[in-house]
Image (spheres, helix red, strand yellow):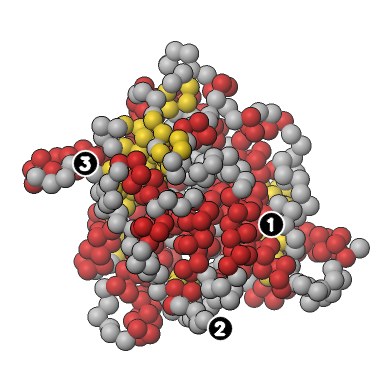
Amino acid sequence: MTPKSAAQRYLSTRGGSYDFSFEDVVLKGLASDGGLFIPEEIASLPSDWHARWKDLPFEELAYEIYSLYISREEIPEQDLKDLIHKSYSTFRAKDITPSVTLDEQKNLHLLELFHGPTFAFKDVALQFLGNLFEYFLVRRNKGKEPQDPSREHLTVVGATSGDTGSAAIYGLRGKKDVSVFIMHPKGKVSPIQEAQMTTVLDANVHNLAVEGTFDDCQDIVKALFADPDMNSTHRLAAVNSINWARILAQITYYFYAYFSLVRKTGQSNPTFRFIVPTGNFGDIMAGYFATRMGLPADKLIIATNENDILHRFWKTGFYEKMPVHGKEAEGGLVEDGVKAAESGVKETLTPAMDILVSSNFERLLWFLAYRTSSVEETNRRRMEAGEKVKTWLDALKKDGGFGVNKEILAAAKENFDSERVSDKQTIQTIKDIYGASVPSATQTNGHTSAAPATTGTQHNGHYILDPHSAIGITASLRSITACTESAQKTGGDPAIHHISLATAHPAKFSHAVELALKDVEGFTFEKVLPEQFVGLEEKDKRCLDAPASWERVKGIVRELVEKEVQAKMA
């Protein structure tokens, strides 16, 4: 038996848990000390990675990356390949995550991540996570009859502001021995998002409309995971981006986008940056893992909306809940799912990014603490990093914020930069990109992906951005300007490629798009509405109302899981 590498063993960011398997961290989701799971070491790329991987299809590339973090003893080679194929056969685009070029002269590219079942980037991870849950449970329950009390049943709980919920439900619907409970703030997700969730009538899917905010929903999830009584009777699993498998799955498309760029430019090592619309920090954290593994990105640019806690951290070194400067957002659209949250969160046109505290930022903090430590012995260094993270997170909970020293901030700036984008700028960018010429398709694996890549995002020869993707493009254009000016002063290379992540199909936030394009003659959303959305809001729905009380939700979960289990035993 080949021993697991350090990248295939996992620890908690808060220092209290070590030596977990991949299966452990997938099924647990959250460490018992409240921390998030990370690999003991970030995997190194094989020496021939560039030559061997550059022409691989998405699924084969995913296998190469996943297998660096999953030992064959846990998931045999063919099983992992089958899981990957099952996960991505549900996508509409042949390339899974195709790239398009928005501006040849500016070297501006868009990585389309919305070709999965629910038209959001989260499908890339949640289709895989759902299949992982089922795979591990089938293996654990092999030979056990439905009536066997030792048969394991997974209770997945999650909170959503819209996209996570539908992607999780589509990834878990009908899965054997899995119950899924998704909480959303009642009346504060878009009608399309709500319909995507509540029209799924599979017996194992349960939607709870919570009388409160998204933050209330997240607090309920955390309370359930922290409750010893609940954990003694139910195997709880996390579906939010705190689950390591979601980060792992997203690493692939950073490499895939890079190789698409290599093929398009004909350059073996083009200079490039990734720009990521950022809320909970999971998507860009996958980019961080990719760069630390060896992907030669010049920079990762965090693109935030007016909820700018991350942007302020990179400018000041202080991570504070309450905004200390900056113009207040003017509102946002109820129709697109704005969510009133705790004090300090502003409602914007990009509700999926209206987040006060970014959960996955904790993972980056651990690596920053570890990299800047003067301690030489590895285990002591890991422990010290965990202690620092715990101290910072305790201060965030108690005092509403914390600061880091200049060494930590400098380390953060090595890989990242940040931009803050207002609603007004978001609307203007949607207008500007729509007014430009049709994007050309990036060549991937020798075929053009224009047709599948842009279905529902083109109208009369113009490209339509969703508001979250528009924030990424706005930040990209600023970076392009800064790079050009810097090159003029220093004589450096001005031809830096910018790859901006498109996180959702525009139809999911159609009201913001219509607000931006309402004065454009001939524009109509009906002509580009995906067929999957037509009539969706009129379908039968199932959803339970719930108070913003974790004890009450606990009772609901217990009752419904018991009914499910009893029905299978009958």
Q: Are marks 3 and 2 in contact (CB under 8 Å)?
A: no
Type of the residue with mark 3: Ala
x, y percent for residue 15: 44, 79
Q: State which tag comes first along the sequence, 1 or 3.
A: 1
Observer-nearest of 287 and 215:
287
**Residue under circle 1?**
180
Q: Are marks 1 and 3 in contact (CB under 8 Å)?
A: no
Picture layout, residue 316 above or below residue 513 = below
Q: Is residue 342 visible?
A: no
Horizontal relation, residue 123 to residue 282: left or right: right
Horizontal relation, residue 23 to residue 315: left or right: right
Q: CA distance from mark 1 to mark 3?
A: 47 Å
Q: Is residue 177 visible?
A: yes
Q: Which mark is residue 329?
A: none
x, y percent for residue 510: 52, 30
Question: Can you say which quadrant of the picture contains the N terminus?
Answer: bottom right
Q: Are marks 1 and 2 in contact (CB under 8 Å)?
A: no
**Residue lying at 53% horizontally and 53% vertically, measured from the top left:** 59
**Residue under circle 2?**
1
Secondary structure under tag 3 reads: loop
Question: Can you say which quadrant of the picture contains the C terminus?
Answer: bottom right
Which circle, 3 or 2, is nearer the viewer?
A: 2
Type of the residue with mark 2: Met
